[in-house]
Amino acid sequence: MVPPPAPFTSSYAEVLPPPALRERIRRVWRYRTGTTSKTTTLVLPDGCVDLIWDGTRLFVAGPDQQAVAVQLAAGTRLTGLRLAPGVAHRLLGVPMQMLTDQRIAADAVLGRRGCDLQQRLAYDAHPMRTLLAAMGTVEVTPDPRMAWLFAQLTGACPPRVPALARSLGISERSLHRHCLQAFGYGPKVLDRVLRLQRMLRLAPDATSLTAVALDVGYADATHLSHDVRRLTGLTSRALVRDHAG
């Protein structure tokens, strides 16, 4: 995405990264608050890690186990890269369980690279261009097994954990260890998080909460509501009303 992307017209928008970077970056995004008052936004867990520039500092948003309410000042502009599955632990050089539920300054994770990138961002009118250019210079090979696992759990009929482990030729204990390193939590939690995201994608076209619950693999709407409450603190109806689509 060089030159910079066209201006975003909504408060939040995301697009695909340039083709050459899609093994490393899942989405590029911008978020802009209103100019008159502070904003509280609920960040939902999605199994991903983001590198974010807020106009002053560059930080890493680690994988969330539950929804997080974030307060932002009026006029805040965030620019972010959502890292591709199976990349974050290799790109950042630390296991993701060290970053779970945390927001950490980039230089604390990336060291000198993080400091240099933050300095460049401070003097650049197009932070997205700078972030993408920086990602293009980093030598990193995604973890194909963890990328495959994420894709399986994102699909319509995800296999259960024992089947995933067998497909990868490893034990369930080893799979759990790899998931902690790549995603910050084990495969069962990752499955719940990605099922929540599938529910949000399907809900706008579903005829009822029971229908969407069955579509994403729950036995009934009650089981869906239990997981929604655990992951977000909201009822299923409130989550769909405010965040689906």
Image: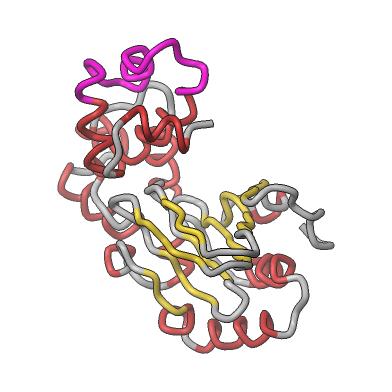
If the image is split into quadrants, where does the N terminus sit?
bottom right
Q: Is residue 227 left or right of residue 198?
A: left
Q: 146 or 198: nearer the eye? A: 198
Residue 222 falls within the magenta-colored stretch: yes
Q: Residue at x 31, y 62 (%)?
A: 101
Q: Which residues are magenta?
A: 203-223
Q: 91 or 15: nearer the eye? A: 15
Q: Residue 208, how many percent across, how many down?
A: 38, 13
Tell me: residue 60, above or below residue 162: below
Q: Residue at x 53, y 82 (%)?
A: 114
Tell me: residue 165, above or below residue 179: above
Q: Is residue 2 left or right of residue 190?
A: right
Q: Residue 37, how many percent across, how many down?
A: 56, 64
Residue that lies at the very extreme toward the left in this rendered image: 173
Q: Residue 158, how many percent across, how many down?
A: 34, 27
Colour treatment of the image: secondary structure
Q: Residue 213, how many percent across, how many down?
A: 32, 19
Count up the numbered dots.
Answer: 0
Residue 94 falls within the magenta-colored stretch: no
Q: Is residue 206 left or right of residue 27?
A: left
On the image, which quarter does residue 181 sit in?
bottom left
Q: Residue at x 48, y 32 (%)?
A: 244
